[in-house]
Amino acid sequence: MKRNAGNIFAGDFSHLDEELVEILVQNPNVRVERIVSTGQSSPPEFWYDQAEHEWVVVLSGKAQLQFEDEDEATVLEPGDHILIPARCRHRVASTSLEEPTIWLAVFYS
């Protein structure tokens, strides 16, 4: 098996117009992604409704997740993590404009 090494914080993100999503590792049962946001949010009225569970941790920056069944957004800062069960409708309400928000997301069935 080929080794896959890198640095989760590496990169120049100052030019990003859209979120950067990189698959770091995957197999049929699990996928790990690095997501870098630079102020992006979900479009109005858009909701993620995924068939997979998603565990996500914010490594840098700040984000707010809005869940369809909650009035208040959940604020995530470095070190904060959350499990989003499959079919739990959610959206990214906001991400930091001051510094890149780097997420590590693990998707599984």
Image (cartoon, rainbow, N blue to C red):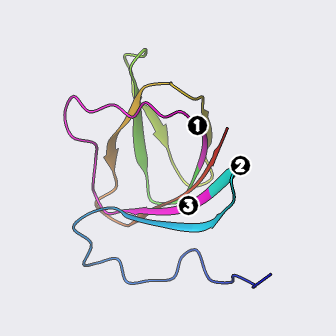
* Label 1 SS: loop
User: Which residue range is magenta in the image?
Assistant: 32-56
Front position among marks 1 and 3: 1
Q: Residue furthest right?
A: 1
Amino acid carrying mark 3 in the image: Glu
Residue at (42% x, 36% y) in the render = 65
Which quarter shows the N terminus? bottom right
For the residues labelled 1 and 3, say whether their Cβ atoms are less than 8 Å apart. Answer: no
Looking at the image, residue 70 lies above or below residue 2: above
Q: Which residue is mark 2?
A: 29
Q: Which residue is mark 3?
A: 33
Would you say residue 75 sits in the magenta stretch?
A: no
Q: Position of residue 84 (x, y in %)?
A: 57, 33
For the residues labelled 1 and 2, say whether their Cβ atoms are less than 8 Å apart. Answer: no
Q: Which residue is mark 1?
A: 52
Q: Position of residue 37 (x, y in %)?
A: 36, 60
| Prevailing secondary structure class for the magenta stretch in the rendered image | loop
Front position among marks 3 and 2: 2
